[in-house]
Amino acid sequence: MMVGTVLSGFEYRANKEKMDNLEKYLKDKEDKYHYTGFTDEAITKTQNIGYQNNYFYITTSSTKLRDYRKHFEPLIKESDDDFKKHMKQLKSKKDTYINTEITTTLFSTLDEYDEKIIRKNTLSMAKEMRKEPSIPHNFTFHLLFSNNKLKINDPNISNNQINEYRVFDHDGFKN
């Protein structure tokens, strides 16, 4: 689990421009699609899943610690350009491939969670995202909308009413 958490940060670094564009895209669409993301405080105090910002988190399949140390750890000290190039090379090989997923954490700002409106918004937003070249398309991407009710004793998005749609689907090694 810890190696996957670290590798999610590697994915962010290797795809920083597109990940930052995705964050901006999601921020810009808040009013149109009636949602908000996690607050900075919520992320700092409750999340332990790897790279996360207000609107999405990144998870990766794990690798063995010895493989991480052999293949991925040496990249840490590389320049950003070399890092990107070497991450791409590692992900193109079957023995060092890591599957990466992006999942949004979007909470409805509507007073009442209306499944019909949320479903319509989810599909509309997914169509828009597929046409947006500045965001990452090379990962499995889950567009997740939730109601705005958090349980104080367990403030986890999975305890809410959820509408999920897979915008991009990339499972498994493809060479």
Image: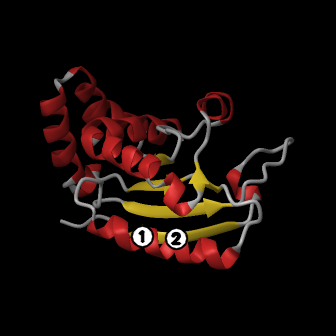
Residue 110 falls in image quadrant: bottom right
Please give the name of the residue rendered at 62% of the width and 75% of the height, measured from the top-left corner. 117
Could you tell me the amino acid type at mark 2?
A: Thr
In the displayed structure, 2 sits above or below 92; it is above
With 132 as the anchor, is 30 left or right in this view? Answer: right
* Quadrant where the N terminus is found in the figure: top right
Name the disc covering residue 126, or none: 1
Name the disc covering residue 112, or none: none
Residue holding disc 2: 122
Instruction: Let me know if residue 61 appears in the view.
Output: no
* Quadrant where the C terminus is found in the figure: bottom left
Which residue in the rendered view is the most extreme toward the right?
A: 153
Instruction: Let me know if residue 88 appears in the view.
Output: yes
The spot of residue 91 in percent (x, y) is 24, 51
Distance between the alpha carbons at the discs numbered 1 and 2: 6 Å
Residue 112 falls in image quadrant: bottom right
Please give the name of the residue rendered at 15% of the width and 47% of the height, measured from the top-left corner. 89
